Image (cartoon, grey):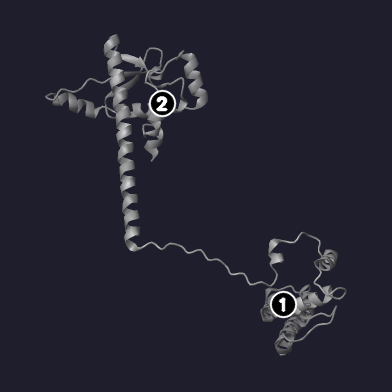
Amino acid sequence: MGTSEKHEKEREHREQRQYFRQLDEKLIRNEGTYYSTKLLEGQKSLVEEVVEEANNVYRTVERPTEATYDSAVLVRATTMNLRKARNLKDVTSEFDWSQFIEKITRYTESDTPDFSFKKLGQLAYKHLTRPVGVDFMLGPVAIEKIVKERRKFVRDEIEELKMAEQIDKRELKKSSKTAASSLVKEMYQSISKHFATNNITSMDLFEIIVNPQSFSQTVENMYNLSFLISNGNLMIKSNENGLPEVIIVPEIPDNDEEEGERRRQLPRNQLIMDMNVPVWEDLIKVFNITESFIASRDNEAMSTGQSISTWYG
């Protein structure tokens, strides 16, 4: 860009800044009369004229400096419009009910000496385009608003409610742990009894946990079995076919500290099993499971807390 072009651009930028300042000064100079001036139909307000002129100049703006001047004009124009809107009077507050009723009465009694609802209805029908509501029928009658009184709790009642809530939570947590411990204990007793009765040392994992009548209780059985394995009562190993089977871990004699130390040093491996409805259905078919090894819990037992829902409480 040559020197002459550079000077020409600078002159244009200077003129733009000067024009925006003039528009801003015009708003400041006429702000007092703007709020009280009443416009004729089709006439533009001062703010409308200034904003329109600012928009015309803004189309040629190329730099942020001049755009800042334009934004200052728009901010002042917006502020003036906001103040004018706040100063507008609420016309509904100036409505004279007594004069309104007097004129209606005079209109309906123009033909007959009595108040004619029929004539009033015919007049209203010409101007109403929707059904009237009940509030319209009340007319100018003053309606007293019914305020519902709310009960205020005293401090003793609030403290009593907090204490009851804390006790309920503790009891729920205690009952949940008790229910879960009871189910784990019952599972271990069933497995031990079955092993002793049939003189066996291992049993297929899925035959123990799968309940063909209930997917949710199958998941519960998996959950209970995990506690027995974690506590060292049971152990899972793979049989000759590569399938998981459960064996009972013999109890450690009280005087055999060496065996106890050996077991504590054994590596612990975690098993993550994905159990969903399709897998559950396949296990029932593949292993031909027709009855649940662990007795099914009925709905009544579940409602007392002996279900998987209590473990999430």
Q: Quadrant of the N terminus?
A: bottom right
The quarter of the displayed image where residue 172 is located: top left
Going 77% across and 86% down the picture, which residue do you hit?
37
The quarter of the displayed image where residue 249 is located: top left
In-front residue for pair 11/231: 231
| Disc assigned to residue 97 | 1
Distance from disc 2 to disc 1, alpha carbons, whole Å, reads 72 Å
Residue where numbered disc 2 is placed:
298
Going 20% across and 26% down the picture, which residue do you hit?
262
Q: Earlier in the sequence, mark 2 or mark 1?
A: 1
Quick one: SS at disc 1?
helix
In-front residue for pair 242/105: 105
Q: Where in the figure is residue 82, as x and y percent of width and height?
A: 67, 77
> Given the current orientation, which residue lies at the most extreme right position?
111
Hey, what amino acid is under mark 2? Asp
Q: Where in the figure is residue 5, as x and y percent of width and height?
A: 79, 77
Rendered view: 247 above or below 183: above
Q: Where in the figure is residue 2, as x and y percent of width and height?
A: 78, 76
Quick one: SS at disc 2?
loop
The quarter of the displayed image where residue 134 is located: bottom right
Label 2 CA crowd tier, 10 Å (few <14, some 14–19, many 20+): few
In the image, taking residue 167 as reference, residue 133 lies left or right, namely: right
Q: Quadrant of the C terminus?
A: top left
Residue 181 visible in the picture: yes
